Image (tube, rainbow, N blue to C red):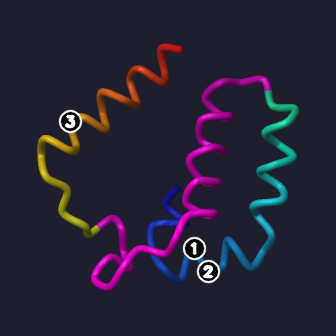
Amino acid sequence: LQLTATKAGRHVVRDKGTYVVLRELHHWEQHQEVLVACEKVIQVLIGDEPGPGMENLLEVKIPEEVEQELQRLDKEEEEK
């Protein structure tokens, strides 16, 4: 996911055809952690580009309550 943190990184990953590779990997991969990582990268690749001021997602300030909710959802997803 670090490669998709910046606008330039997302552009490179899209241009290299990563989506097609991840889509195929997702069909046969058996490890849950790898599947979850593939799904997260795919969501970034097929989603709309974030708006102005969000070119580097690592620098975006997330409200504490939103971050806690996202962590809770990640934990639930891992437990499945």
Q: Residues within 10 Å of mark 1 (few under 14, many from 20)?
A: some
Task: Where is residue 2? Give x, y as percent.
Answer: 49, 60
Task: Where is residue 70? Give x, y as percent.
Answer: 31, 38
| Residue lying furthest top | 79
Q: Which residue is mark 1?
A: 10
Q: Secondary structure at mark 2?
A: helix
Task: Where is residue 34? Give x, y as percent.
Answer: 66, 35
- Residue sitting nearer the eye, 39 or 47: 47
Q: Secondary structure at mark 3?
A: helix
- Residue sitting nearer the eye, 21 or 3: 21
Dot 2 and dot 1 residues touching (CB under 8 Å): yes
Looking at the rendered structure, the kind of residue marked 2 is: His
Looking at the rendered structure, the kind of residue marked 1 is: Arg
- Residue sitting nearer the eye, 68 or 4: 68
Q: Total number of numbered labels? A: 3
Q: Secondary structure at mark 1?
A: helix
Q: Which residues are magenta?
A: 30-58
- In the image, is residue 69 part of the stretch drawn in magenta? no
Looking at the rendered structure, the kind of residue marked 3 is: Gln
- In the image, is residue 53 part of the stretch drawn in magenta? yes
Q: Which residue is mark 2?
A: 11
Residue at 32% from the left image edge and 85% from the top image edge: 52
Name above or below for residue 35 compared with residue 31. below
**Quadrant location of residue 66?**
top left
Q: Residues within 10 Å of mark 2 (few under 14, many from 20)?
A: some
Q: Which residue is mark 3?
A: 68
Q: CA distance from mark 3 to mark 1?
A: 25 Å
Q: Which of the numbered marks, if any, corresponds to residue 51?
A: none
Q: CA distance from mark 3 to mark 2?
A: 29 Å
Residue at 68% from the left image edge and 34% from the top image edge: 35
Q: Residues within 10 Å of mark 3 (few under 14, many from 20)?
A: few
